[in-house]
Image (tube, rainbow, N blue to C red):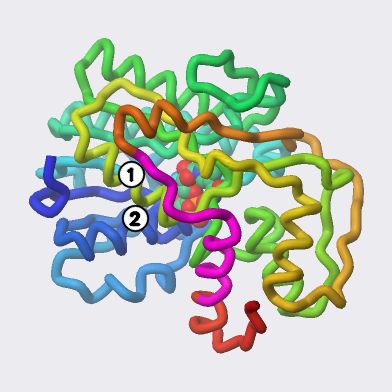
Amino acid sequence: MKIEDKRILVTGAAGFIGSNITSKLIELGAEVIGVDNLFNGSLDNLENVLEHKNFKFKKGDIRDLNFLLEIFEDIDIIYHEAAFTSVPQSILMPESCNDVNVNGTLNILNAARKMDVEKIIFASSSSVYGDSPELPKREDMNCLPISPYGVSKMTGEAYMQVYYQIYGLKTVSLRYFNVFGPRQKDSTYSGVIAIWLGRLINNKNLIIFGNGEQSRDFTYVEDVIQTNILAVEHNIKGEILNIAAGSPIKLTDLAKLILKLTNREDLKITYTDPRPGDILHSFGDISKAKKIINYQPKYTQEEGLREYFTWHSQKYKIDLQIS
Ligand SMILES: NC(=O)c1ccc[n+]([C@@H]2O[C@H](COP(=O)([O-])OP(=O)(O)OC[C@H]3O[C@@H](n4cnc5c(N)ncnc54)[C@H](O)[C@@H]3O)[C@@H](O)[C@H]2O)c1
């Protein structure tokens, strides 16, 4: 399937990953409709495409089925990125998380069925695995999520599978593992790399929840975009794929690497209590994605960090001394 001939809807288009996917699709020549309620996203993330002839932005909520039915006309493909995205917030507000991630996702599926959409690529998460000890995580392992967010993503995936099996709607779920890169927000509920970048710019020590021995398979956003394109170009359906770098790093080592890359070894790494819902180790087996969509991660974590910090210093005119 050729992306450039398609009319594509991206939910969560004003968010971190959705805006990066949108930019890539426009660059490839596709027509894109971006949907977002701006709960966590910002139009600033779409500034490079807002005026483009192939792009339209529709402000609205995926929980509103009538809104979706109005805008779903002639859509070929959906990238479903919109979500209640924070694990700690999902613990404070499980109903809201469920409402957006489960009911909202079901709305997307129902609207897609009704409007004859060809394919849906769903942004799932490594959080579905929970804290089972076996590593690396393979797609055929049992899911035992330990947060409402993880439960909501597992349910979204299950609906994707069922809508393929029962109604023949082509769906693919991509289980992203800790994504980082340009446009990631620096707020209490963001990914740790964006938070640490914000702290070091403000001359603050880097804080780790727990003893720093926990590990994550940080994945540069360009590799995530690559897999989203490949998942459409390849004729796959009803599949679940891990999307990771395939190389975990301990949080303490990551913090040290960031301080070294930015020549900020004057700052300290401090440790505080672990947070509920946080997984101890996360490491994705990516052999299935390599095999069925020919995924080859292009960025090591260090390369991704350099790209991200360079982008950040140019965008915000901050002289990060990247070595
Ligand atoms: N960033 C990661 O490390 C990571 C890891 C695993 C999975 N994911 C998944 O990838 C997707 C994108 O995540 P992100 O990091 O870009 O997060 P993000 O918060 O930057 O983007 C999500 C977007 O969805 C929008 N949104 C929220 N509720 C909505 C609603 N009811 N209707 C319409 N729009 C709504 C937000 O305003 C935001 O722009 C999400 O589904 C997330 O769960 C992200």
**x and y, in percent, of residue 294 in the image:** 31, 37
Q: In this figure, which residue is indicated by the disc labeled 2?
A: 21
Q: Say whether residue 296 is magenta.
A: yes
Relative to 259, 244 lies left or right: left
Q: Is residue 22 visible?
A: yes
Along the line of sight, the residue nearer the viewer: 138 or 52:
138
Using residue 147 as the reference point, say whether residue 276 is left or right of it.
Answer: right
Number of numbered callouts drawn: 2
Q: Earlier in the sequence, mark 2 or mark 1?
A: 2
User: Crowding near pointer 1: few (<14 within 10 Å), some, many (20+)?
Assistant: many
> The residue under label 2 is which amino acid type?
Ile
Q: Please provide percent x and percent y for residue 145.
A: 64, 24
Residue shown at 16% from the left, 33% from the top: 118
295 vs 277, nearest the viewer: 295
Crowding at mark 2 (Cα within 10 Å: few <14, some 14-19, many 20+): many
Query: From what the image shows, is residue 71 above or below residue 59?
Result: above
Residue reaching furthest top?
166
Q: Position of residue 112 (x, y in %)?
A: 22, 32
Quadrant of the frame with the C terminus: bottom right
Q: Quadrant of residue 199?
A: bottom right
Image quadrant in which you'd find residue 73: top left
Q: CA distance from mark 2 to mark 1?
A: 8 Å
Residue appearing at x 57%, y 37% in the figure: 97
State whether residue 165 is above or below residue 256. above
Pointers 2 and 1 in contact (CB under 8 A)? Answer: yes
Say which residue label 1 marks.
228
Looking at the image, which is closer to me, 323 or 4? 323
Q: Secondary structure at mark 1?
A: helix
Residue 67 shows in this picture: no
Q: Which residues are magenta?
A: 295-310
Locate residue 241: give its quadrant. Answer: top left
